[in-house]
Amino acid sequence: MSAGSFLLLIAGGVATGTIGAMLGLGGGVFLTPFLVLVFNLPMHQAIATSILAVIATSSAGAAMNVERQIVNLRLGMTMEVATVIGAIFGGLTANVLSGDILSKIFAVLLLSVSFMMIWRMRHSRGISTPVEAGAFPASFTDEASGEVISYSVARVPWVMVISLIAGNISGLLGVGGGIFKVPAMNMISGIPLKAAAATSNFMIGVTAAASAFIYFAHGHLNPLIASPAALGVLLGSFLGVRINRRIKGAYLTWIFAAVLFLISVKMFWR
């Protein structure tokens, strides 16, 4: 591998890790298309690399978010049971499907998420469930506003079902599962966005690890690609968590949604 390619992989990892840590998405939703479109990497190798990078994202971001007491640990550990089961089945399914089919699934998923992010921003501002109305009560300090926000979790069974689906998609496409869990926690259970993103980031590493060994066993993991990408994602994760502390996210949501839309179109017609 040339020095230019090595540096480009690190730079791409930093960018995707920053975005992933900010939104609790894991970064795989951006890293996988980056590897496919820029490096022309086979889809299965891109997914395997993305899963490894997701583990790095979660390891870095989760520690910082737990220290800030923004992660709902009890909810995260409860949802993770369903998510890991889904991730294992997703990893097994991915090795049966062709790379072309996986690319099409990924493109449709990105398009759906782009509209979901816009919908969430337009219709779910300020949604939270009162402490006495749900399970797993928690509170955190929003460092951007200085406000102490208390909430609880409504409709836990529905979120568990979505966690199972999110885990399956994580293992299938290497995207971390946060693209479903964050909106679900916010829109269905009434969890504030920052707490939902931090809790998702806490979970995605375990989810990814559950399916990573399947890709490794099938020989899809290329260390020369995965190492610099994971290093970049790890560095970006620290940056993303710090930015998350100071940003409200309205403008970034529009930008990310537009980027997802463009990538989905390009990958679908690739």
Image (spheres, helix red, strand yellow):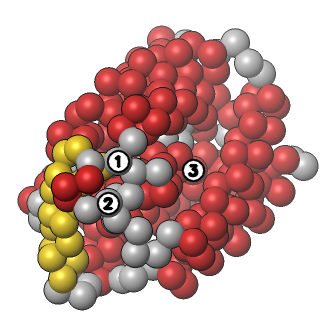
| CB atoms of marks 2 and 1 within 8 Å | yes
Disc 2 to disc 3, how far (Cα)?
A: 28 Å
Sequence-first disc among 1 and 3? 3
Tell me what residue is drawn at x 40 percent, y 32 percent: 157
Give residue 57's position: percent from left, percent from top.
Answer: 34, 50
Residue 129 - label: 2
Q: Earlier in the sequence, mark 2 or mark 1?
A: 2
Q: Which residue is mark 1?
A: 154
Instruction: Please name whichever residue, 167 or 48, is drawn nearer the observer in this view of the structure.
Output: 167
Residue depicted at x 51% and y 82%: 250
Q: 202 or 212: which is nearer to us?
A: 202
- Which label number is shown at residue 29? 3
Residue 256 found in image quarter: bottom right
Q: Is residue 227 above or below residue 219?
A: below
**Residue 60, how many percent across, how many down?**
24, 53
The residue located at (63%, 59%) in the rendering is 116
